[in-house]
Image (cartoon, grey):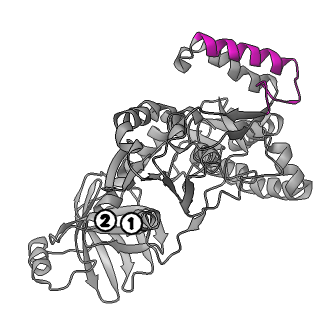
Amino acid sequence: MKNILLLFITLLGSNVLLAQKCNCESNFELVKKTFEENDAGFEYVLEKKGEQAYKVHNEQIMAKIEKAENIVQCSDILYEWLEFFRSGHISISLSKDVQQQNAEVVKKQDFSNWDVYKTDVSKFEKYLKAKKKSDVEGIWYTEPYKIGIKKDKDQYVGFIIESGADTWKKDQLKLKISANMDSSVYYMRDHSALTSSDVKLLGENYLKIGNFILKRLSPELPKDDEIERYITMVYATQPYIEQINDKTLMLRIPSFQYESKAAIDSVLKANRTLILKTENLIIDIRNGTGGSDSSYDELIPYLYTNPIRTVGVQYRSTKLNNQRMLDFINKPEYGLPEEDKKWAKLAYEKLEANIGNYVGINQYDVNLTTLDTIHPFPKNVGIVINKGNGSTDEQFLLAAKQSKKVKIFGRTTHGVLDISNMYFIDSPCNEFKLGYALSRSKRIPNFAIDEIGIQPDFYLDDDIPEEEWITHVNEILNN
């Protein structure tokens, strides 16, 4: 579960021709064969869904493959084929060269005839300052655009005031929002339309349109501390601690990626005294990235009340899969210490001795974590989650849930944990990398997480806006 890679390809189809020896059909054959012979979840899903469903899926995909005109379109279809098996720990990632070629094609496209909405900006600003009631009308910013939004009959229209993208010019129509704010269309950098019913003002100064958040530039309106805290949380790239009140701390962890481990450990170390004298701790991991289990090692002692059981995994042993252990040993980019290289060598030997089987490479199927100390504070720990959490995030939750201190708040997680530990191989013409999984959990089928997720102890319903979740959790912990 080193990475969770949920690929959403939004690039516009380019005119990059598929090489004759690497057409979409041959790429599909490679992906299909590699996945069937090596992915740790292939047999498990096939048994659940059945041969007939798989046959129909292959036929439907093949019909689309035959119509693919370029590698970008092909990669979309290949990813769609992978989604038959699960929604995470799969990937088709285009090479940097292909992405660059596609970006160049998009830049050269002619959008000069795109709809425009001409407005005198200086008059518009005066109009905004004179308004007695604030609404969506205003001047907004989202990287790299300054956008004016104005009411026009039965809708709001957004137009470019300034653009940092070659594909967008002044006055061009950038977005539309229905008058009652129940639907929107946002035009992407390549001018493709992204529709959403998730449209709302966050306080006075932020506008959420689907996955985009725009910041108001004009008119200037009073700030809302709760909204500002939420925006800081959304855009955080590094972990941090914030004191909510004298009884509650909030620890924000945007990612459990291995690269974030040092930063997480540093924040915990710097705030150790404060954490251990504060009654309540809120840990916000919403919209995590998955990552490495080791990234939360130093957090566990603050939650611990009793031994934590962690069920292990089995690796599918094939010649291709076992190569990863050799990569750990021989490739400098992994940077493994000698002790870990010895582990990888022993694991490789065990796997090679059991080709074609599922192999547990550690000594025990279940690991028991026992610590010497149970800290009196934090007394209550609330972990905040949503649909954006999966993989290592979910492994952390399985461990944390075993503590008597911990309650989980939010929404059911994504459900991508049972089949994990990704490996990546290049396509024959280096147009993309295929990512698939090497291991399956010993929990399945008795305690499956994939496509199910982990449910919160406290479900936060739609009447509690996500920007108010921390306040809501704080109130519960302080009661």
Q: Quadrant of residue 24?
A: top right
User: In the drawing, does residue 268 fall left or right of residue 441?
Assistant: left
* Quadrant in the picture for residue 139: bottom left
Compared across the picture, whether 450 is left or right of 71 comes to right
Identify the residue at image location x=44%, y=46%. 254
Between 472 and 51, the residue placed more toward the observer is 472
Marks 2/1: CA distance? 8 Å
Measured along the vertical axis of the image, is residue 392 above or below residue 331?
A: below
Disc number lying in front (2 or 1): 1
Could one spot residue 66 in this view of the protein? no
Q: Is residue 309 above or below residue 464?
A: above
Residue indicated by mark 2: 226
* Residue 2, horizontal then vertical, whole percent: 60, 35
Q: Is residue 441 left or right of residue 411?
A: right
Residue type for callout 1 = Thr
Number of on-image labels:
2
Quadrant containing the N terminus in the rendered view: top right
Q: Nearer the viewer, residue 353 or 408?
A: 408
Whether residue 197 is situated above or below residue 405 in the rendered picture: below
Question: Do tag 2 and tag 1 residues touch (Cβ < 8 Å)?
Answer: yes
| Residue type at tag 2 | Glu
Is 14 included in the stretch rendered in magenta? no
Residue sitting at 85 percent across and 54 percent down?
Answer: 54
Q: Which residue is mark 1?
A: 471
Q: Which residues lie in the magenta part?
A: 338-365
Badge 1 local density, few (<14 within 10 Å), some, or many (20+)?
few
Res. 395 image quadrant: top right
